[in-house]
Amino acid sequence: MAIPKVMGTEIEYGITVKNDRDFDPISSCVLLVNAYREDHAGRILWDYDQENPLADARGFQVDGEKYTPNQQENIARNKTLVNGARYYVDHAHPEYSCPEVTNVRDLVLHEKAGERIVEISRREATALLPKDAEVLVYKNNSDRKGNSYGSHENYLMDRRTSFKQIVEHLMSFLVTRQVYTGAGKVGSENRAQPCLYQLTQRADFFETEVALDTMVKRPIINTRDEPHADREKYRRLHVIVGDSNMSEYTIYLRNGATALVLSMIEDGAIRRDLALRDPVRAIKEVSHDPSCKREIQLENGKKLSAVQIQREFLEMALQYASSRTLDAQTRDVLDKWQHVVECLERDPMELSREIDWVIKKAMIESFMERKGLDWESPQVQMLDLQFHDVRPDKGLYNLLERQGKVARIVTDEEITRAIHEPPEDTRAYFRGECLKRYAGEVFGVNWDSISFGIGDEPIKRVLMGEPLKGSKAHVQDLLDASPTAADLVRNLRA
Amino acid sequence: MQRVRIRATGDADAALLPIFGAADQQQKQRPRKGGDEEEGGGEGSQKLAKKGEKLKEDMDALVDEIDEVLEENAEEFVKNYVQRGGE
């Protein structure tokens, strides 16, 4: 039986400062992240003790130096938020890791809340700069000059499912899901074949099939084995091959279909042979073909288009679903997946309200036609970039959303609420509530722990190896019976 | 009863403390969101033409609005937008 797919996303944003000759990305990131103030505004550490990004899922440890900042730097770069998220500086980018959620609707809500939080801090940070300067932030993945920054999805998986099984079945799914997960990009880069417009921001950057790296020689399947949970029971599949999506519908389908396929892998329900001959080549071929008709080579000699391969996965998923009682949301994911595959089979441009790369392409084409521009003109490149601008008034995706031109999954009210409220059905609830109630005594946080410093006592660390424990149902009474952190620790001991 | 360890850092006598009872997951039922309603198709060529006109007007208005907010010095701005690789 597949385990519940607890999920989360980590989004790295692009950043620049307009009218600042001395723009420095790292100090701008620190300014941005620290401009976001919650009531607790504490000196809370991110607990690096618990991290091990060099463990490889294939069963070994890679040599390398683990990054551990000093205390001051740690506090300056890391914010743990009352909604259970982590907002921080990663290399030269601001990054938002949403709290753990159990379902794709909550995932959309919290990924979108992250955009709002970035926008709030962008405004606050800009207010601290000289008059003409403005911090600008983009939820995209490339500067179109060969530099890429990530958008990572995380899925909780059963440790008993071998990594080999995951690789075997997931590769062709990840390569072909681009037809509905792409955020769209004008042109190509990183020595890829030239093209006018492609489905994804990221395909040009994938150079190998399976590896631990994320910054150089990027792999389609990443082997980082850092479960942030009980490692005897779980793995956290770290999917680094996606784009940062703007469309709620696209985010919903991206994570929904992927989670379903992972459950099917755990249950041994992928039985068709869809292995690709050359996934690294195929990922670019698929991305560079907005008609979605081009066929790619399978290992068994057949040739199928990405849409045909997605149709195969969809059929297996429908069959899988028919023998189980699924919750309403998983059924809804299947309905949307089916709708999208059918549109892609007829004409991808039918998805100009749902799927990012189509929304963007339709917008650019209307603009080009009216203004007599071509794909190489600077305005068209600007449209591509500004589509991802997080400002509500200037961001072009946000403009389309305000005009009712794109499909929604959640409401603005729900997103606003998710800025301050953690999901109620995972350990993120306990984390968020501890920050709301006991911020002064919270010493450090990581995904699977929270530690308290009470008076002169030694630091007490609460371990949370079970992502589904620490939910509201589990801890509400405990929290209500604990007016102070000292009470909480005492009650945990009782 | 599930147990979660609390330990004092740098201290070997980790205490085992009960927290977070058995998982009684509540599967939240969310209202279903269907695909978007198709716009009703017009009958007859006149209606179609009208619809086409309306679409074009809509599109023109949208292009104007985009044009208004689009960064003015597109060429320079795009050229200067350089990021360090991340992840």
Image (cartoon, rainbow, N blue to C red):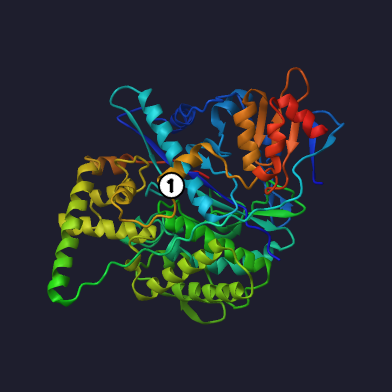
Which element is circle 1 on? loop
> Which residue occupies 28% across, 60% down?
A362
Q: Quadrant of residue A458?
A: top right
> Which residue occupies 40% across, 64% down?
B35
Q: Nearer the viewer, residue A326 or A477?
A: A477
* Pointer 1 residue: A147
Image position of A129 (left or right of A158): left
Q: Nearer the viewer, residue A99 or A77?
A: A99
Amino acid tagged 1: Asn
> Which residue occupies 56% across, 32% down?
A78
Crowdedness of circle 1 by 10 Å Cα count: few (<14), some, many (20+)?
A: some
For residue A21, say whether it is visible.
Answer: yes
Q: Percent x, y for residue B67?
A: 20, 46
Q: Nearer the viewer, residue A225 or A432?
A: A432
Q: Percent x, y for residue A142?
A: 41, 48
Q: Quadrant of residue A16?
A: top left
Image position of A204 (left or right of A260): left
In this picture, is A132 found above or below A86? above
In this picture, is B50 found above or below A11? below
For residue A204, say whether it is visible.
Answer: no
Query: In the current view of this chain or complex, which residue is farthest to the right?
Result: B13
Circle count: 1
- Considering the image in quadrants, where does the C terminus of chain A appear? top right
- Considering the image in quadrants, where does the N terminus of chain A appear? bottom right
Q: Chain of mark 1?
A: A
Q: Quadrant of residue A460?
A: top right
